[in-house]
Image (spheres, rainbow, N blue to C red):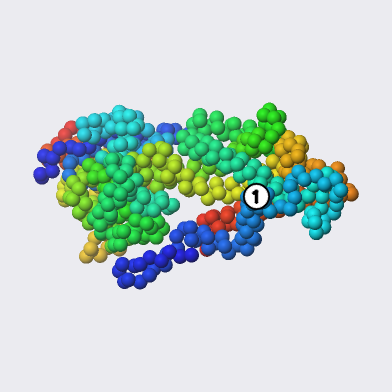
Amino acid sequence: MELEVKNEENGELDKIRTPLAQFIRKFSRQKTAMVALVFIVFIVLLAIFGSMIVPYGIEAFDYSAITKGPSATHFFGTDEFGRDIFSRVVCGTKISLIVGLFSVTIGAICGTFLGLISGYYGGILDSVIMRICDTLFAFPGIILAIGIVAILGPGVGNVIIAVAVFSTPTFARLVRSSTLGVKKSVFVQAARSIGTSDFGILIHHILPSALPNIIVQYTMTIGTSIITASSLSFLGMGAQPPTAEWGLMLSNGRSYMMMYPYIAFFPGFAIFLTVLSFNLLGDGLRDALDPKLND
Amino acid sequence: MTENKAKNILEIKNMHTYFFTDNGVVKSVDGVDITLKEGSTLGIVGESGSGKSVTALSVMNLLMETKGRVVEGEIIFDGKDILKLSNEDQRKLRGGEIAMIFQEPMTSLNPVLKIGDQITEAILLHTKTTKAEAKIKVLDMLNKINIPRAERIMNEYPFQLSGGQRQRIMIAMALVCNPKILIADEPTTALDVTIQAQILELMKELKDMIGTSIMFITHDLGVVAEVCDEVVVMYCGKVVESADVYSIFENTKHPYTKGLLASIPKLGEHIERLESIPGNVPNPKHMPKGCKFSPRCKEAISICTEKEPEFFEYPDGHKSRCWLCKKEYGGEL
C-alpha cells in the first residue's frame, strides 16, 4: 500500500509509504498472524450473528437424544440434557469475547493512565502506584480473580471487573517504562519549549510512542483473560448455569469425560483456538510494530 | 555602536544552577551575568561542559526533568523575574515570548506526529485561533523558511525530511508565535557546512523580519563571527570574557579566548599542527583552586592558582575575568 503524491517540481507521482502502510505491509507478510487474524474475524462474526444461525436454542432440552455423539443432526453431539453442543459452543463465543474485550479494555485504559502519570511525574505518586502494582503482581492472577469475585459475588459482570483489575498492573508497568524512556527525549523537551502543557505532552507526545507496546500487550492479554474468565466459570464463580459459557460447559462435561469426551472436548477446543489465535495475532503485531526488527 | 542604546530584553543576574546528583552537587552554572539587548544577537561560546546549554535551559525553565535547579539569581524578562512566575505563566512564556531550537534536529521532532500538526500545536497553545486559521499561518511560516512543497510537507512525518529541513521546521515551530527571544542551542552543529550556512542565513533573515533577539549558543567561533553582535565566553560555569564581536576577535583579553581562537585553522596559513589548549575542562567535582583556567593557562602567574579573579572591566565595556588584565591596566594585585 502506497500513497501516491504528485510531485510539484517535476509533475511525477512519488510513492511514499506512510507508517500505516509500512505496518500493513509487514504484518501481511506474516502468514500465521494473518491466519489468526482471519480466524478472529470469523469468531467475532460468530459472536455477533451466531445466535441467529445455530440450529438449536441453547436451552433446547431434548431428553430423547442425550449424550449423543457427533452426527449430521448434532455436529458436536449433545450433552447430558440433550442440548446441542454445537449451538452452545457457537453462542458461548459471545460471552467469552465480551468478557475478554471489556475486561482488557478497562484494564488497558486504567493501566495506561496510571502508567503515564506514574512515569511522568515520578516521586511519591510513582512509588505508591508501583507498590500497589507490585502487590497485585504478588498474587497469582487466578487467585486474585477468585478473591475479587468472592467479594463481589459470582456473575459475568463481576468476572469482567476481576479480570480488569488483574490486567491493570501489567499495562501500568509497561506504559510507565515507555514513559520513562520517552519523557527525557529531545522532542518532548522541544514540545515543552513551545509551551505545551503536561497534559498535552502526555496525550500527544508520550502516549503515541507507547501505543505499539500497548496494542501488543492488549492483544496478548485478551487470550489470557478469556482463559481466566473461563476458569472462573469452571470453578463456578463466573457465568451461572444454564448460560452457554465455555468454561462452564467444560466443567459440566468433566463428569462425563471418560464416556462422552466430546461434551468437554468441543468447548475446550474452542477456548484453545481462540486464545491461540489472539496470542499469534499479538506475536505478529509485535513483529510488525517493533522498530528494531525493521528491514 | 547603536545596539548599546537599545534596551535590555533579557537580563540574567548572578544566576547559579546546580545539579543535585547522588554523588554530590555539580555547580554547572556558577554566578553568570548575561544581558541580551533588544534586536541583537548574543553569542555564548565555550567548550563542552562549560555551562552554555544549562544556562539556556535555566532561562527556558526546562530543568524539571533533570536534577538541576536554579538556586540563586534572577532572570529578568520584560521587567519581571521569570523564576518567580507561576508554572502556568512560565508555560505561556515558553514558545510565546521565549522560544528555543535544539542541537539535534533528527530527534527534536516527534517521530509519530505530522509536521503540520506539530507546528499548529505551537500556534494553538498561544493564540486563540481556529485550526483552519492556524493552518494558514503555518503555511505562511513554511513559505518564510523557504521550504519547498510546503503544502505537502504539512502532511509528512519527520522521517521523510533531511536534517537541514528538520532544523528549518524547528525554526518555524519556534518562531511561528513571533517570540521576543530565540535561544538557539548549537542549531548548526549537527548539520553539514553548506546547510549550516543556509540555516544561519535563514535565522538572520527571520530575525529582521520578526524582530526577535537571539541568544546563540555555539562552540564554533566562525559561526559567532558570522551572526553575533556580542559575545560571551563561558568556562566552568562562569563568564570569563564578554565584549562586542569585534573586540573579541581583534582585541582578545582572556587567555582562554586566545586559546580558542588559536585553535581555529586559518585559510592561507600553512602549519603542521594546530594549536590546542592543553588538558580538559576540569571535573566539576574537583575544581582547581583560584582561577579555574589556571592549570591549562600558558600565561598563569602565581596569584592565579591562589585567588579567583574578579571580573575586570575595561573603559570600552570589554570585560575579562583574568588577573593579567588587571595587571595590564595597572591595578594592584
Between A201 and B213, the residue placed more toward the observer is: A201
Q: Which residue is mark 1?
A: A47
Q: Between A70 and B212, which is closer to the camera in this rendering?
A: A70
Expressed as whole percent of the image width and height from the top left, the position of residue B158 reads 39, 56
- Looking at the image, residue B111 sits to the left or right of residue A93; the answer is left
Assess disc 1: are there few (<14), some (14-19) or many (≥20) residues with their C-alpha within 10 Å of its C-alpha: some
Q: Secondary structure at mark 1?
A: helix
For the point 62% across and 55% down, which residue is it? A41
Q: Position of residue B292 (x, y in %)?
A: 32, 39
Task: Examine the image and state in which quarter residue A224 appears.
Answer: top right
Q: Nearer the viewer, residue A159 or A17?
A: A159
**Left or right: residue A179 compared with residue A65:** left
Where residue B182 appears, x then y in whole percent?
A: 26, 45
Label 1 is found on which chain of the structure? A
Residue B113 position, x and y percent, is 41, 51
Whether residue A166 is visible = no
| Residue at left offset 80%, top offset 44% | A61
